Image (spheres, rainbow, N blue to C red):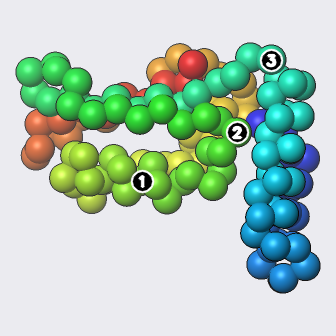
């Protein structure tokens, strides 16, 4: 995910915040920006979060497009905390750095002994 793309999204959100454009116009701009981004980056990548119970059965999963990763960081932390029932904090900056470096595959694995759950985070 390029810094320029992220900066453009922030600029659109700032215009909405400042009342320079309506939320509807801002949404149109963000959708157009996303469309252009997808055309430039033909390979669509997703952040996948899988949570398994102690029997190695998938308990929950989430798939988050990398194009919205920078605005999804709070969701990711809360999602993992709620599913695992723990206050374990995932370093979202490491996830963003891996995404920006175009890394693929498993980027994090965490076993929660107290709640007997495993969290795996991939970029695919």
Element type where label 1 sits in the image: helix
Instruction: Classify 10 Å Cα crowding around label 3: few (below 14), some (14-19), many (20 and above).
Output: few
87 to 94, vertically: above or below: below
The residue under label 3 is 42
Instruction: Measure how far apart labels 1 and 2 are at the Cα level.
Output: 17 Å
Q: Residue furthest bottom?
A: 18
Instruction: Classify 10 Å Cα crowding around label 1: few (below 14), some (14-19), many (20 and above).
Output: some
Instruction: Tell me: 67 left or right of 9.
Output: left
> Residue 3: horizontal and vertical position, in percent?
85, 46
Q: Which residue is drawn at 86% across and 44% down?
A: 33
Camera-nearest label, 3 or 1 = 3
Q: Which of marks 3 and 2 is nearer the N terminus?
A: 3
Instruction: Tell me: 55 left or right of 28.
Output: left
Q: Quadrant of the N terminus?
A: top right
Q: Is residue 10 visible?
A: no
Of residues 95 and 9, which is closer to you in this image?
9
Q: Quadrant of residue 25?
A: bottom right
1 to 58, vertically: above or below: below
> Residue 107: horizontal and vertical position, in percent?
50, 27
The residue under label 1 is 77
Element type where label 2 sits in the image: helix
Instruction: Measure how far apart labels 3 and 2 are at the Cα level.
Output: 12 Å
The residue under label 2 is 67
Query: Would you say the residues marked 3 and 1 are in contact, meaning their CB atoms lie under 8 Å apart?
Result: no
Mark sitting on residue 123: none
Q: Can residue 39 be seen in this view?
A: yes
Of residues 115 and 68, which is closer to you in this image?
68
Q: Earlier in the sequence, mark 1 or mark 2?
A: 2
33 to 107, vertically: above or below: below
Of residues 36 and 74, which is closer to you in this image?
36
Instruction: Classify 10 Å Cα crowding around label 2: few (below 14), some (14-19), many (20 and above).
Output: many
Q: Which residue is drawn at 27% across and 34% down?
A: 60
């Amino acid at each position: 995910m390029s810094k320029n793309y992220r900066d453009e999204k922030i600029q659109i959100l700032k215009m909405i915040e400042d009342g320079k454009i309506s939320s509807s116009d801002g949404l149109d701009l963000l959708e157009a920006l996303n469309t252009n981004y997808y055309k430039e980056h033909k390979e669509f990548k997703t952040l996948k979060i899988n949570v398994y119970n102690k029997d190695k059965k998938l308990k929950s999963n989430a798939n988050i497009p990398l194009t919205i990763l920078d605005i999804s960081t709070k969701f990711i932390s809360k999602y993992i905390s709620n599913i695992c029932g723990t206050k374990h904090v995932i370093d979202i900056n490491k996830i963003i750095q891996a995404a920006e470096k175009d890394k693929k595959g498993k980027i994090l694995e965490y076993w929660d002994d107290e709640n007997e759950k495993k969290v795996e985070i991939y970029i695919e």
